[in-house]
Image: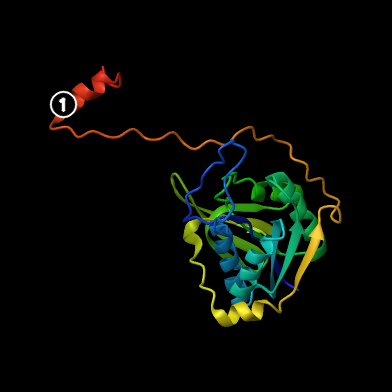
């Protein structure tokens, strides 16, 4: 069976203004709207389109985190994924741990493609896809704005500073998605009802023989410094004088 694995991460919704806890130990999540990482929704949409074109038989979504992650996995099933796997984990799960989890699941699922968002909007690490490709010893095509499957190869376009770079990689491979790849579909109520009957299995880190202990220690969370109020100048001479007064202009 031709199978695609897709990662789904639970994050604070992109429309919510993130606030640090008063003691600096983390961010406030109580009563805050949580959603799937937007880049992961793009990855899922691309996998679903591949299946609809006949390039894949099954799309499996994978979420790593607390029990609440199942809400986002159910939403992914409502979008059209065939089944979901929830790997239970508490606290912050570092990219290297996520990559090892996917590697374990690859051994049993045998996908021809793993599609991940290029980064998560909560930590912005952008490392998981690259680490997974290294551990799996398979090609990677990151920040993809176009993916075309051609037999046992994939042609990927990715935006770089100099323009559009086109890569050809052998399958199986790891892909990470950029914003311009597609626009995820809306979930309809009948699909939400159908998703409740789709299989969602649960695993633990111990079952996968993975040590999830963090390698990094987060010391403190702080909000960005408040921007100073701007001033309006009448002409260039006043602008130059204001910059010189602030030591920004000689």
Local packing at callout 1 (Cα closer than 10 Å; few below 14, some 14-19, many 20+) is: few
Q: Residue furthest top?
A: 250
Q: Quadrant of residue 148?
A: bottom right
Given residues 97 and 21, the one toward you in this image is: 21
- Please determine whether, in this image, residue 43 is positioned above or below residue 227: below
Measuring from the top left, give residue 166's x and y in whole percent: 52, 54
**What SS does tag 1 mark?**
helix
Q: Is residue 227 left or right of residue 40?
A: left
Measuring from the top left, give residue 198's x and y in whole percent: 71, 77
The residue under label 1 is 238
Question: Which residue is at a point 79% across and 64% down the rendered structure image?
Answer: 202
Question: In this rendering, does residue 127 appear at all?
Answer: yes
Q: How many marks?
A: 1
Question: Which residue is at a point 14% across and 25% down the rendered structure image?
Answer: 237
Q: Residue furthest bottom?
A: 190
Q: Quadrant of the C terminus?
A: top left
Question: Which residue is at a point 70% across and 62% down the rendered structure image?
Answer: 62
- Please determine whether, in this image, residue 61 is positioned above or below residue 124: below
- Please determine whether, in this image, residue 202 is positioned above or below residue 217: below
Q: Quadrant of residue 73?
A: bottom right
Measuring from the top left, give residue 25's x and y in whole percent: 62, 38
Question: In this rendering, does residue 171 appear at all?
Answer: no
Measuring from the top left, give residue 117's x and y in whole percent: 59, 56
Q: Is residue 184 left or right of residue 163?
A: right
Q: How is the image coloured?
A: rainbow
Question: Which residue is at a point 81% across and 53% down the rendered structure image?
Answer: 205
Q: Quadrant of the N terminus?
A: bottom right
């Amino acid at each position: 069976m031709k199978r695609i694995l897709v990662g789904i991460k639970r994050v604070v919704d992109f429309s919510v203004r993130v606030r640090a806890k008063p003691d600096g130990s983390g961010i406030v999540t109580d009563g805050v709207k949580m959603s799937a990482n937007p880049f992961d929704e793009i990855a899922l949409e691309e996998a679903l389109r591949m299946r609809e074109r006949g390039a894949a038989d099954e799309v499996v979504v994978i979420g790593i985190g607390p029990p609440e992650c199942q809400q986002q996995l159910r939403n992914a099933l409502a979008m059209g994924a065939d089944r979901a796997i929830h790997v239970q984990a508490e606290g912050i799960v570092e990219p290297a741990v996520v990559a090892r989890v996917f590697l374990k699941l690859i051994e049993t699922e045998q996908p021809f493609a793993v599609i991940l968002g290029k980064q998560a909007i909560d930590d912005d690490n952008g490392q998981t896809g690259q680490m997974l490709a290294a551990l799996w010893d398979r090609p990677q095509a990151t920040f993809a704005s176009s993916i075309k499957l051609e037999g046992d190869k994939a042609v990927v376009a990715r935006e770089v500073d100099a323009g559009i770079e086109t890569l050809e990689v052998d399958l199986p491979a790891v892909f990470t998605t950029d914003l311009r790849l597609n626009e995820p579909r809306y979930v309809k109520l009948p699909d939400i009802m159908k998703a409740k009957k789709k299989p969602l299995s649960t695993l633990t880190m111990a079952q996968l023989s993975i040590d999830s202990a963090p390698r990094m220690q987060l010391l403190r969370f702080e909000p960005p410094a408040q921007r100073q109020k701007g001033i309006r100048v009448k002409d260039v001479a006043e602008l130059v004088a204001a910059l010189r007064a602030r030591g920004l202009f000689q």
